[in-house]
Image (cartoon, grey):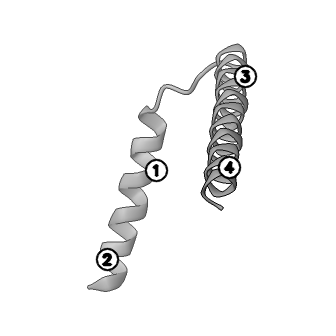
């Protein structure tokens, strides 16, 4: 029973992968660059937010003492 289920699952997965429209090399490169740039921009935004909140926290500690 379990072996039959596993065999059917693998066969259907292979059939589904044959129907996939894979991106061309140029599309894959372009999309990879888009993801990479987005990750860098988000790292800059989160880093700036972290820095700003840290400065605000230190300022609040300084004026409360």
Residue ID at (71%, 42%): 51
Residue 42 placement: quadrant: top right
Foreground: 6 or 29? 29
Relative side of 15 to 64, left or right: left
Please state the horizontal and vertical placement of residue 34, each as a whole percent of the image.
66, 21
Foreground: 40 or 18? 40
Q: Nearer the viewer, mark 2 or mark 3?
A: 3
Please state the horizontal and vertical placement of residue 35, each as a whole percent of the image.
65, 28
Q: Which residue is mark 1?
A: 14
Helix, strand or loop at disc 1?
helix
Distance of label 2 from label 3 (alpha carbons) = 42 Å
Q: Who comes first in sequence, dot 4 or dot 3? A: 3
Residue ID at (64%, 57%): 61
In the picture, the disc for residue 33 is 3
Distance of label 3 from label 1 (alpha carbons) = 29 Å
Q: Nearer the viewer, mark 3 or mark 1?
A: 3
Q: Nearer the viewer, mark 1 or mark 4?
A: 4
Relative side of 25 to 21, left or right: right
Q: Which residue is mark 4?
A: 54
Near mark 4 (Cα within 10 A), the count class, few <14, some 14-19 or many ≥20, is few
């Amino acid at each position: 029973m379990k072996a039959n289920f596993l065999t059917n699952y693998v066969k259907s997965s292979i059939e589904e992968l044959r129907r996939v429209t894979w991106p061309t090399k140029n599309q894959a490169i372009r999309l990879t660059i888009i993801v990479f740039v987005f990750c860098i921009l988000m790292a800059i935004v989160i880093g700036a937010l972290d820095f700003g909140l840290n400065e605000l926290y230190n300022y609040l500690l300084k004026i409360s003492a």
